[in-house]
Image (cartoon, rainbow, N blue to C red):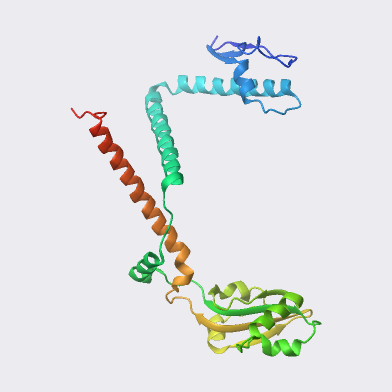
Amino acid sequence: MRDFLIFLVIPLFLSSCFSKEDERIIASVNEKDLFLTEVLNEMPNQIEDSAYFIERYMNEWIRKKLMIYHAEINLSSDLQDYEKQIEEYKHSLLIYAYQQELLNQNFDTTIHNLELESYYIQYRDQFKLNKNIFKGRFIVIDKSAPNLVSLNKLFKSNEEGSLDDLVDYCQQFAKEYYLEDDKWQYFSLFNEKLPVKIDEEDYFLKNTKGMFFEDNLYRYYLYITDYQLKGSISPLAMEKDRIKNVLLNKKKIEYLKQLEDELYKNGLALKKIKIH
């Protein structure tokens, strides 16, 4: 039974010039030919063993062609459906690539704060917190660090200049610190760092302003300036990125629809479209 014919020619040497060899057929499977020039076009510029690359490429090509050949034979009754799906997939890829190119070249990604605020107000019930959040400070410092007595007061001080002093101290001695107390953060991020995890977060946030914890090596300072509990409406500051992505996606859809409409109108105007 001769379902296919394979003819192999493996070059044993490669000279600096392939001009006479480039159009040489090096493998055939069921009347499908692989030319040496096809392989050379795929070969990296710098390669140590070019003969090995050609042999491997050729063997992979043969295996692929054989699988395609037998798939076509055994799926002949459904082949038209597969061809239709393949064609549709190809068209989808082309359209997607073209759309991405248009977006990269001309799409304005600017989302103004007024748009963010308007969306947030309209859909605020969708922005419920699934975790507790807080504003505050967090410091981890070696128990042998100098002036811990001063730090005991400084870490929760809001007097003028105290934050600068705290930053300076932490830069010199802290193992880890977070002092951006004007930004919301998930409390769990810092709870996990404590030597003893706080199980009753709600109670702790409601009844604690500033305190420290200790283990054998370190002291952990935690200062809370504000908090919101799980289930309440998340502040806009925490949802800005999420809202921006939603608005950008909506804006992209509208932009691409507009381009599609323009192409349609131009096609009609230039008589490239005929409706019978």
Pick the residue in front: 218 or 122: 122
Q: Residue at the spot x=33%, y=50% of the render?
A: 254
Camera sees residue 195: no
Camera sees residue 124: yes
Pick the residue in front: 148 or 105: 105
The reply, left or right, for residue 269 in relation to residue 236 is: left
- Numbered circles on residues, count: 0
- From the top left corner, tell me how far across and down residue 176 is, in percent: 70, 73
Q: Residue at the spot x=57%, y=24% of the render?
A: 64
| Quadrant of the rendering where the C terminus is positioned | top left
| Quadrant of the rendering where the N terminus is positioned | top right
94 versus 58 height, above or below:
below
The reply, left or right, for residue 69 in relation to residue 96 is: right
Q: Residue at the spot x=39%, y=25% of the render?
A: 78
Furthest residue to the right? 144
- From the top left corner, tell me how far across and down residue 204 is, in percent: 57, 85
Pick the residue in front: 82 or 160: 160
- From the top left corner, tell me how far across and down residue 205 is, in percent: 55, 84
- From the top left corner, tell me how far across and down residue 189 is, in percent: 60, 72
Furthest residue to the left? 276
Pick the residue in front: 110 or 237: 110
The reply, left or right, for residue 130 in relation to residue 195 is: left
Quarter of the image holding residue 215? bottom right
Quarter of the image holding residue 96? top left
